[in-house]
Amino acid sequence: MGQWSGDDWQAYCDELLIARYGADYQRIPDELGDYGAEGVTSDGCAVQAYAAEEVVDSKKLYEAQRDKVTRDLGKLRKNRAAIKAMIGKPIKRMILMVPEVRTKALIEHCAAKAAEIRAAGLDEFDEAFDIRVLTGDDFPEERRRLGEHVGIALGLAPEEVSASDVVAWSESNSELAANLERKLHAVASLSQDERNQLGEALIRLYLRREDVLRQLRSNFPALWEKIHAEVRGREQALAAENLLSNATARARLADLTEEMEERLVAAVPDARSNGPELGWGTVAEWLLRCPLELSTAVDAAS
């Protein structure tokens, strides 16, 4: 995660927690004092963020984090009545959020300290109270929502599009379907039957892309925005390229599709498994709407 200042790490943790819990996460203002927790969740967690600055040695990092757990647990125990009142129920868990954990000794220390609390039988703590140490890696979905690349494919699964779905869409969007049919006549090297098959395949890919974008916009709006910006930015040059490109219609379709798949996966690496829908579907949209035109003369002469 790199080197963090304490304030930056706290702000980042707040973003992750809000992305996960929404209104069920309550930040504790500094003006209220140090309760051993900087926020609470409605399901019973007391959360503290900690970034050990200028610590590079694993042993020293462990010692700093270990001492942080001990200190904050002491404060949490002292202020347990106030924390329980904020949550509205006994404290179920203490969470320490850190940029990294390098040794299992920290986990063992947390387990031992939690056992002490349970043994004390304090009413303000849940009888199964425990302590967990989390890093940013424990928030992959939330990080994606914030627009981060976390190195794990999203695996968005667009719904299958049947031949009848393509027909129904074409009938409901007859003007767009006519645009596509007109433009595919530029691919003179294909027979009419092959152009029909290509048109059906492009509409299917367009609809699958729309489903991928819908899922992104609903669940990962920052990633959707990156793709939207990349597509619209690339679209600006299409009008000039329509007039100046010397590529055959077949070659231009293939090159644009490959380019867009590469660009969109580069913009949102976690969507790499949906690259074909994004690449082909984007070009299909341009053919349907009109930004992209193809030249019959160039293709026929090749």
Image: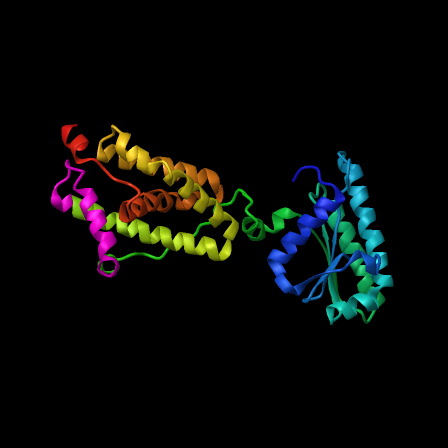
Q: How many marks?
A: 0
**Residue 160 quadrant:** bottom left
Q: Is residue 291 left or right of residue 115?
A: left
The x and y percentages for residue 92 are 73, 65
What is the x, y in percent for residue 35?
Answer: 82, 59
Q: Residue at x 42, y 52 (%)?
A: 213
Q: Is residue 176 magenta?
A: yes
Q: Is residue 95 above or below residue 194?
A: below
Q: Is residue 59 left or right of 223 when viewed as pictured?
A: right
Regarding residue 237, the answer to whether it shows in the image is yes
Residue depicted at x 33% and y 47%: 281
Tell me the magenta residue range: 168-194
Q: Nearer the viewer, residue 235 or 144?
A: 235
Residue occupying the point 70% across, 43% down: 101
Quadrant containing the C terminus in the rendered view = top left
The answer to whether residue 229 is magenta is no
